[in-house]
C-alpha cells in the first residue's frame, strides 16, 4: 500500500502543479509610487532638480532677450542722437559736438598733399589732371557724408517707431 499511496500522492502533486501553471497569472497594471524607499526619494529629487533647471534656463533665455532688446534700443537712440547732431551741424553751421567734447562726430577732411620736387615745373595739362582728381575726391567725400546722414536719419526714425511699439505694449 505504501507504493500505491505514494504514487497517488505524486499524481496529485503533479496535477496541482499543472493547474497552477495553466491558470494565468494576473499582473498588476498599477505600480504604486515608491515614496518610502530610497529609490522613490531619489526619483522625486531628480524630477525636482530637472524642473528647477528648466525654470532657470527659461528665465535666463527671457533675461537675454530683454537685454538684447535694451541694447538695440540704446544703439538706435545713439544713432538718432548722432543724426540730430549732424543735422544741427548742417543747419546751423556750428559744431556743437566739438563744443561738448565729442570727437566721434567730427569728420576731418585732410586734403591730399601734392608732392612736388623742387625745381621741376609741371605741364599745365598735369596741373589740370591733379585738380580734377581733387574734385572727384571731394565729390566722393560729399557723397559718403550724405549717405551717412541718410542712414542716421533712417536709424532715428526706426528708433522712434520701436519706442512707440514698446510703449504700446
Image: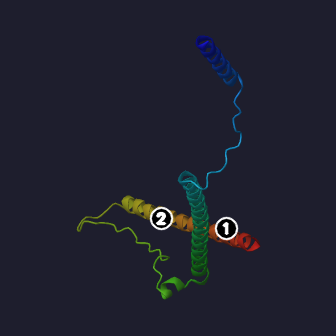
Q: Earlier in the sequence, mark 1 or mark 2?
A: 2
In the rendered view of the protein, which quadrant contains the C terminus? Answer: bottom right
Tag 2 residue: 135
In the rendered view of the protein, which quadrant contains the N terminus? Answer: top right
Q: Is residue 161 visible?
A: yes
Q: Quadrant of residue 64?
A: bottom right
Q: Is label 1 in a helix, a strand or a loop? A: helix
| Residue at the spot 50% in from the left edge and 76% down from the top edge | 105
Q: Residue furthest bottom?
A: 99
Label number found at residue 115: none
Q: How is the image coloured?
A: rainbow
Q: Is label 2 in a helix, a strand or a loop? A: helix
Label 1 neighbour load within 10 Å: few <14, some 14-19, many 20+: some
Q: Position of residue 25 (x, y in %)?
A: 69, 30
In the image, 105 versus 121, the foreground residue is: 105
Q: Residue furthest right?
A: 168
Q: Position of residue 92 (x, y in %)?
A: 60, 84
| Residue 15 position (above or below residue 70) | above
Tag 1 residue: 158
In the image, 3 versus 65, the foreground residue is: 3
Badge 1 vs badge 2, beta-carbon distance below 8 Å: no
Would residue 127 appear left or right of 17 to someone viewing this image? Answer: left
| Residue at the spot 33% in from the left edge and 66% down from the top edge | 114
In the image, 37 versus 62, the foreground residue is: 37
Counting labels gives 2
Report how far apart the C-alphas of labels 1 and 2 lie in the structure.
35 Å
| Residue 58 position (above or below residue 96) | above
Q: Position of residue 33 (x, y in %)?
A: 65, 51
Label 2 neighbour load within 10 Å: few <14, some 14-19, many 20+: few
Residue mark closest to the camera, 1 vs 2: 1
Q: Position of residue 166 (x, y in %)?
A: 71, 71
Would residue 125 appear left or right of 94 to someone viewing this image? Answer: left
Amino acid at each position: 500500500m505504501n507504493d500505491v499511496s505514494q504514487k497517488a500522492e505524486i499524481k496529485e502533486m503533479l496535477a496541482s502543479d499543472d493547474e497552477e501553471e495553466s491558470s494565468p497569472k494576473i499582473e498588476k497594471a498599477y505600480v504604486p509610487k515608491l515614496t518610502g524607499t530610497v529609490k522613490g526619494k531619489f526619483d522625486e529629487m531628480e524630477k525636482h532638480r530637472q524642473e528647477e533647471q528648466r525654470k532657470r534656463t527659461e528665465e535666463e533665455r527671457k533675461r537675454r532677450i530683454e537685454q538684447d532688446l535694451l541694447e538695440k534700443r540704446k544703439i538706435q537712440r545713439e544713432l538718432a542722437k548722432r543724426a540730430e547732431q549732424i543735422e544741427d551741424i548742417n543747419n546751423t553751421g556750428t559744431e556743437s559736438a566739438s563744443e561738448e567734447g565729442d570727437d566721434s562726430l567730427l569728420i576731418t577732411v585732410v586734403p591730399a598733399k601734392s608732392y612736388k620736387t623742387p625745381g621741376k615745373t609741371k605741364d599745365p595739362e598735369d596741373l589740370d589732371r591733379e585738380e580734377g582728381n581733387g574734385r572727384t575726391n571731394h565729390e566722393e567725400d560729399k557723397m559718403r557724408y550724405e549717405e551717412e546722414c541718410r542712414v542716421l536719419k533712417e536709424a532715428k526714425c526706426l528708433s522712434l517707431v520701436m519706442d512707440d511699439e514698446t510703449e504700446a505694449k
